[in-house]
Amino acid sequence: MQRAYVLYLYYHLLDTVLRKITLNTTEEGACLNWHGAIDVGTPVMAMPHRRMGRCNDPALKPPQQIRVRALMLELFSNKRPPTKAKTPRSIVVSNTCLNQECICPDCSRYVRRGVPIAMGLANMDLATSTLRRKRIAETKQSIRVLTPEQVQRIKFELSTTARELARQMNVNFSVVHSCRSGRTYQDFRPSPFAGLGA
């Protein structure tokens, strides 16, 4: 009788949790996006009926949160945690689609605890270096002193000296020399009619 009651509580709890998951998700392409709480990058929900079947042993106290992605992976896929794990806590569930809100079992996998952190740091380094390159390129664009016509003239009028061109364009000699030698204005694309003359 007691076992039947425990099974009833288990299935009732599971049914409640799955209903809450259904209400808090939307399907977008191959992903199931979670619209509930997210704790440290992981979709979570509060454990319903925490006091049901309460025992007096504090070591067996039920958890306060359910890791939604891990629950979906365990219930709806054939994937199992690696058997080489030292402890159950050394394995976490991560997603392969890089969508923080996705709880789809097809996008989830078991990984060692340090792997998502390493991936996050690698992505952060990549984003930082990309942003830095973009800022450097914008800075180079903003300090340009020559117009595209002047650059074209410097690069193709090789009969005129750099000093004479600098005097005519009212710029420093080093600006013309750097442009002609290719140290600056490397992204310049000449007109297809350059050098034809009038």
Image (cartoon, grey):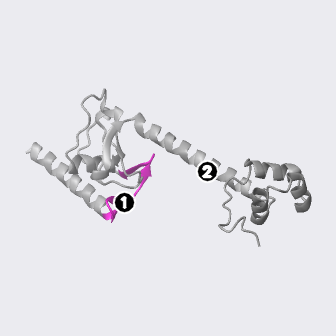
Magenta span: chief secondary structure: strand
Q: Position of residue 8 (x, y in %)?
A: 14, 51
Image height of 59 relative to 37, above or below: above
- Horizontal side, residue 77 vs residue 174: left or right: left
Q: Position of residue 26 (x, y in %)?
A: 34, 64
**Residue 138 visible, this orientation:** yes
Quadrant of residue 185 within the rendered picture: bottom right
Quadrant of residue 34 within the rendered picture: bottom left
| 94, 59: nearer the viewer | 94
| 190, 8: nearer the viewer | 190
| 74, 147: nearer the viewer | 147
**Residue 64 visible, this orientation:** no
In the picture of the structure, the residue carrying the numbered disc 2 is 131
Q: Position of residue 149 (x, y in %)?
A: 77, 66
- Quadrant of the drawing holding the C terminus: bottom right
- Horizontal side, residue 13 vs residue 149: left or right: left
For the point 70% across and 65% down, which residue is it? 194
Q: Secondary structure at mark 1?
A: strand
Between label 2 and label 1, give the one nearer the viewer: 2
- Quadrant of the drawing holding the N terminus: top left
User: Residue 36 lies in magenta, yes or no?
Assistant: yes
User: Residue 69 lies in magenta, yes or no?
Assistant: no
CA distance for labels 2 and 1:
28 Å
The amino acid sitting under disc 2 is Leu
Q: Position of residue 186 (x, y in %)?
A: 69, 52
Mark toward the start of the polypeptide (2 vs 1): 1
For the point 88% across and 51% down, which residue is it? 173
In the picture of the structure, the residue carrying the numbered disc 1 is 33
Q: Which residues are magenta?
A: 23-45
